[in-house]
Amino acid sequence: MLTVTLLGEGRLGELTPTEHGVSGPDGFAVAWDELHTALSTCALDLTAETARWLRQRLEVHGLLVAGGPDAVLARVRPCARPPEHPAHRGPAWVRRRVLGGALDLGLALRGLDAEGRSDREAVSVALPGVLAGLDPLDADRHAWRYLDDMAALATERLRLDPSSVLRPLGDADVLTLLASERFRTALVGEMRMRTAAVPTRTRGWLDLGRLDPAFAVTAAQLTTPEERGFDRPVLVTRDEVVLARAGGDAVRQALADPAPPERGRPVEWMA
């Protein structure tokens, strides 16, 4: 904590460690036991994670002082990540789990980058404990309503443009859209199950029978860990997202997946 306050820039430099915790401007205060609980399961660099947590908490505190809980709720977003993803912050962050074990759904904050610094276009995972002062049920309801709205729009986009490329919508990336039952139902349609490759958070491809079998694995390996999606293909049903078995034969599995019929009719040449 001393390292963070002595070397930290901006508002971090205004914080003061005291006997009871950390204090700052505008009545900002965090008790030592609260900070310890939030960071006790941290598997990353503890100093960097402490700075990240305090930046987010300071941002939330400032919003509460300026506009109350509604100002914070306006910035709350849903966020889904695989359990092994570097942005996943452990069991305390998880609000819902998608059946199949491939995706956990938690909360994020718009307006902050991955380090907790201000960025109007960014969305970052809300670290456990930073939303203190906000009713957890209100935050959940707002996030799930946002996800349902984005899933409805993505479903309509899929109906109008039934291509096999999945793209983000609003602040919901492809992983987050896959956490929506509404969107999964639209994806599978009458097929009941579809295969997908989602090597990055921002792009996904359906119907692997039409892709290079090793595409999903290779694309994930070439993506930075923060931007990575699934490192293997997934099976999507209305209720589940299941990661393909590790160590399996990706080529044989993809070739065995029958591609659905092409939409439209082939061009017929006139004699």
Image: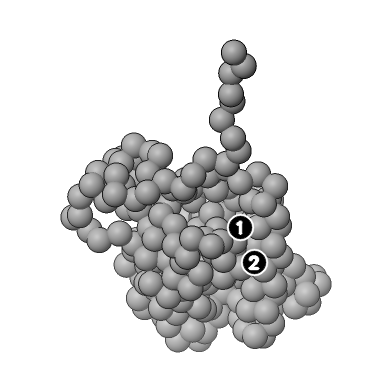
Quarter of the picture containing the C terminus is top right
Tell me the quadrant of the picture where the N terminus can be found.
bottom left
Residue found 63% across the figure and 79% down from its top: 140
**What is the x, y in percent for residue 83?**
37, 67
Q: Residue at x 51, y 69 (%)?
A: 238
Q: Is residue 104 left or right of residue 26?
A: left
In this rendering, the answer to whether 214 lies above or below 84 is: above
Residue 219: give its label: none
Q: Which mark is residue 172?
A: 1
Q: Residues within 10 Å of mark 1 (few under 14, many from 20)?
A: many
Q: Amino acid at mark 1?
A: Ala
Callout 1 touching callout 2 (CB < 8 Å) = yes
- 228 left or right of 150 in image: left
**Badge 2 local density, few (<14 within 10 Å), some, or many (20+)?**
many
Residue closest to the eye, 167 or 34: 167
Residue at the image point whose x is 22% and y is 58% from the top = 246
Q: Residue at x 56, y 70 (%)?
A: 181
Q: Amino acid at mark 2?
A: Leu
Residue at mark 2: 147
Q: Is residue 40 visible?
A: yes
